[in-house]
Image (cartoon, rainbow, N blue to C red):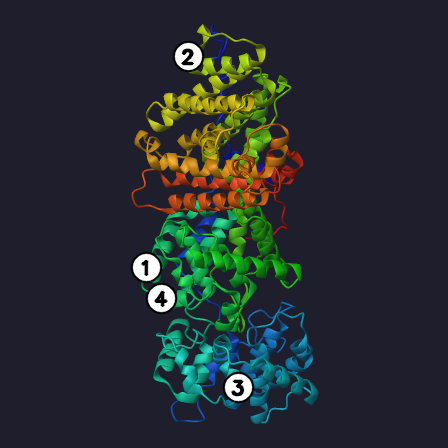
Amino acid sequence: MLLAYGNTFKLLSQQKTERSPSGAYAHSKTPTKRIVQRVDLQGDGSIAKIKDMLHKVELSASPYDTAWVAMVPAGDSSNQSRFPECLNWILENQNPDGSWAFHPSDPLLVKDSLSSTLACILALQKWNVGQRLVNRGLDFIGSNKWAATDSKQKCPIGFDVIFPGMIERAQHMGLALPINTYSLDAMLNKRDLEIQSGLEGKNKYLAYVAEGFTKPDEWKDIMKYQRSNGSLFNSPSTTAAALLHLNDDKCFMYLNSLLQRYENAVPTIYPLDIYARLCTVDKLERLGIDQYFRNEIQTILDEIYRCWLQGDEEIFSDIACLAMGFRLLRMNGYEISSDVFAGLDEQEQFFNSVSEQYKDTNTILELYKASQMAILPSEHILEKIYVWTSSFLKLAIGKGAVGEKQLHKEVEYALKYPHASLERLENRKSIELQEIDNVRLLKTSYSCSNIDNKYLLDLSLKDFNACQYIHQKELKILERWVKEYRMDELKFARQKITYGFFAAASVLFSPEHSDARIAWAKFTVLVTLIDDLFDVGGSEKEILNMFELVKKWDKHSEVGFCSEQIEIIFSAVYDTTNEFAVKAGIEQGRSVKDHLIEIWLILLETMWREFEWARGESVPSVDDYMSSAYVSVALGPVVLVPLYFLGCKLSEEAVKSKEYDDLFRHMSIISRLLNDLTTVKRESEQGKLNSLALRVIHGDGSVSEEEAISETKRLIESHRRELLRMVVQTEGSVVPKVCKDLFWKTSKIVHLFYMGKDGFSSPHEMIGAINTVINKPILLPPYSP
C-alpha cells in the first residue's frame, strides 16, 4: 500500500562537513535531511468530492415522515390528500421485500422498517389507493413482527409509543394486521408505562411522538413547542399530525416549504444544516484531514457563529448540536459563554427537563467533551457537567449499556484520555472505527445523502499511511545521528530518541513540519542527556565545565573539555543548535541564534540551582522551587525551537512578549507538577526535591500528603485552564495561533507521559502508542471510494 505513494516523497541530498579545528563541529556531521517537501494529495479525487459535500447538506427521504405528510387532508375535504406528491412517492417507492424503509438491508433496523412500512400502509389505506402495495406491506409486517419486541434491535426514538398507536389507527381503518392480540396488548401496556410521568422532559418527548396517539387530549398544549419555522421539533411527522388535528397555518407553511425544496418526499428532520456541518468539521479533525479544508472549515464556523449570536433554534434546541458547536467554536477562538448550558449542570435536572430524544449516550458524550473547554476560573457550570457526565459515562461503560461498537470505543477513549488525547492517536482510532455507512437514527433512520464516508476514509487512510512512511524514514536518520555523535556510548544516559520523535509525530504529523519534528526529537535527546548528567552521570567539575562551554559558545575552545563525555554532549548540543539556528534564520528571515543559546543558558542555570539545593542543607520554599523547576523540566529547547518551523513568522516582538513567556510558563508548570505528582515517592527516596514533598515539609504537620496531592491536582487544572484560555483568545495576541497550539498540544503530551506513573521512564507504557503512530500502517478491508 505504501509503495503507491512513493512518488510523493522527495529525498534531498545529504551534505557532510569536516571536523572544525576547535574539536567540535561547525555544523552537524550529517545535517538533517528534509525527507519530504509535501505529500501531494491535493489532486486526489476524494478531496474534490469532500469539498462538494461541505458546500451543502442534503438529507435522505424518510418514508415514515412522508407518509404522515401524505395523510394530511386537503382543506375541509376528507377524500383527498393536501400533499398528493407525497402519496405518489409512496406508490412509487416500495422495496422489493414489501417494506418502505430507507435502509432495508440492515438486520438491526427491522423496527425502523416496521414503523416506516406501517405508516405508508396507513397513508395508502386512508386514501384508498395501492391495495396491492398495502397487501405486500402487510405481508412484510407479518414476516417481521418478531422485531417489534426484540430488545437487540436498534430502536427508533418513540417506537414503543408510535408503533402501537399506528396499529390502533390501522384497526380503526378496518385493516387486518397480522399481529395477535397478546402481542398488541403487551405493546400497548408498554406504551402506557412509557407515558406515565409529569416531568417537563417527558412532556416534551410525548409531544415529539404525538402522532403515536390516536386522540391526544391537548393538541393546543402541544403547540407550545411550535418553533418559529412553524414546525414541532423540526419533525415533519409531528408537524403533519398537528396539521391533521388543528389545521394550523404555520404547520402548513413549514411542510409546504419542505416540499418546495425536496419536491415529493420529506426528510425525518429539517433543518439539520448546522448540526450536519458541525459533525463534518468534527469528523475531518478526528480523521486528521482537516488541513486539506482550512478555508471551507473557516467559512462554516463563521456561518455557525453568526447563527449562534442570533440564537438560532437549530443550535439551542438540540443539546448535541449545542455542545459540539460550543466545543468547536471555543477551540477555534470564537468568544462564546458557557451560560448556554444553564439547567444542564446537574444529572437529575438534565434527565427531568430534557426530552427523551436528547438523553442518548452520544449527546451526553458531547456534553462531556464540551465541559473540558473551561477557560475561566468561574465556569462552574462546565465543572459540574464534567462531574456528572463522566460519572454517567463510566457507569454506562461498566454496565455494558453502550451497545454500538463505535460509540463504545469513543466513550472509552474519551474517558481514558480526558486531557491526553494526542491527535495522531485519535486520528488512527477514528479511521479504524470509521463506518462506511452514514446512517443515523431518530424516529426513523436517515443520512446526509451528499456526505459519503467512503471518500473521508479513503483520504484519511492515504494521508495517515503516507505520513507514517515519512516518519519511519525520519526516525532512521535520527537513530544514525545519535550514533554519529556517539551519544549511545554514554552509559549513564537514557536513550529516548524514539520517545521524543513519537511525541513530535503525534502532534506535528504533517509532512511540511519535518524540521519541527526533527528539532523536537533531537532536543529531547539532548535535554535528556544533560538532565541525566546532572542527576547521575556527571561530577560537579563536569557540570561546571558544561555550563562554561555553553556560556562561551563559539569561543568554547578557550574553555576546553574536562572529559570525553562532556566533549560528546557539548559537541552534539553545539552543532545541533547551530544547525537549527541557520535553518530557522532562513525560515524566519532573521537571526535567532542568540535566542537558542539563551534557552540553553536559562535551562542550565535552573538545573545548577537545583543541583546546589540537592547537595546543600537548605530547603527552598515551594515558590522558590517552582520558579526554577518549571524551567528545569526542560521543555524550553524541546518546544521553543520547533516553533520557528511551523510555517509562520514568529517575530522577535512575539518571542519577547509576556504572552509568549506565560504560554511557556503554564505549559511547563503543568509538566513539572505532573512529573512531581507521579514521581514523588521515587524522587523522595533519591533525595531529590519535589513540590509535593516541600508542601508537606513547609506545612509543619498541618499539610498531609493527601492534601498536597489534592492541591497539586487543583493547580494543574488551574494552569491547564489558563493555558487553554490563552491559546483560544485572539484579541491582543501577538503569538501566532499555530505556535500557541503547540504549547497546548505539548500539555496533552505530558499528560499522556505521566498517566499513572512516569511513562518517560517506563518504556513498556509507551510501546503501543509508538507503534500506533510510527510503525504499524493502517490496514482496512478493500472498498471502492
The percent position of residue 152, horizontal first and vertical second, equals 67, 69
* Between discs 4 and 3, the one toward the N terminus: 3
Q: Are marks 4 and 1 in contact (CB under 8 Å)?
A: no
In the picture of the structure, the residue carrying the numbered disc 1 is 306
Tag 3 secondary structure: loop
Q: Quadrant of residue 136?
A: bottom right
In the picture of the structure, the residue carrying the numbered disc 4 is 312
How packed is label 4: few (under 14 Cα within 10 Å), some, or many (20 or more)?
some
In the picture of the structure, the residue carrying the numbered disc 3 is 213
Q: Are marks 4 and 3 in contact (CB under 8 Å)?
A: no
Name the kind of residue labelled 2 in the image.
Asp
Q: Quadrant of residue 99?
A: bottom right
In the picture of the structure, the residue carrying the numbered disc 2 is 554
The percent position of residue 487, horizontal first and vertical second, equals 59, 19
The residues bearing labels 4 and 1 have C-alpha atoms spaced at a distance of: 9 Å
Tag 2 secondary structure: helix
How packed is label 1: few (under 14 Cα within 10 Å), some, or many (20 or more)?
few
Tag 4 secondary structure: loop
* Between discs 4 and 2, the one toward the N terminus: 4
